[in-house]
Amino acid sequence: MPDLTPENVQDYPRPPALEPVPHRLRVVLGGETVAETTRALRVLETHHAPTYYIPPDDVMAALLAVRGTTFCEWKGRAAYFDVQSGDKMAARAAWSYSSPTGRFKALTGYLSFYASAMDACFVGEERVIPQPGDFYGGWVTANLQGRIKGATGTEHW
């Protein structure tokens, strides 16, 4: 498995890029692995931590659709899910695009998880830190450099 190479979030493009992930991803909730894959995709956008998307076939958790959607100018409309593993429920902790826009069609049906709502999320062997704030779903790893959007004072740039 390759190591995570240094990346500066200011160098990520706008509009965002979509690329395959060369690392194993793992998501844990309720002490159980609820998603694990070597087939993930990630979205890279200026000043954001990468957002990782896992193929639905590699998600083992129960997903319960919830009301409400959000709209991304790049990817389209996202639907949200509660994530259940055993006796533990994480409310509105995952999202997916059923009909993403053209350049993001490969994300159709893939799921992304808020690291802040899970027990743990991993890129390779590294446990991630949730992107700051309560809106963005990026996963922060030690290789990231630059100022990541989401903290107080960064919401509108």
Image: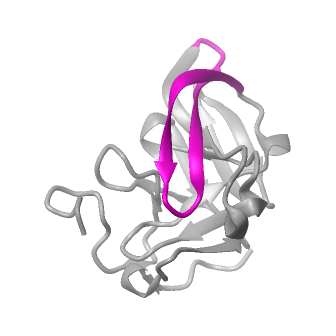
Image location (x, y in percent) of residue 113: 56, 43
Find the residue positioned furthest to the right. Answer: 57
Q: What residue is drawn where x is 46% and y is 77%? A: 143
- What quarter of the picture does the C terminus occupy? bottom left
Q: Is residue 148 above or below residue 90?
A: below
Quarter of the image holding residue 144? bottom left
Q: Main secondary structure of the magenta part?
A: strand
Is 66 part of what is drawn in magenta?
A: yes
Q: How is the image coloured?
A: one colour
Magenta residues, as a range? 62-87
Residue 40 seen in the current view: no
Q: What residue is drawn where x is 67% and y is 49%? A: 26
Q: How many marks?
A: 0
Residue 35 seen in the current view: yes
Q: What residue is drawn where x is 55% and y is 48%? A: 121
Image location (x, y in percent) of residue 60: 77, 32
Image location (x, y in percent) of residue 124: 65, 63
Q: What residue is drawn where x is 79% and y is 42%? A: 56
Quarter of the image holding residue 20? bottom right
Instruction: Report whether 48 appears left or right of 13.
Output: left
Image location (x, y in percent) of residue 63: 68, 25
Q: Is residue 105 above or below residue 58?
A: below
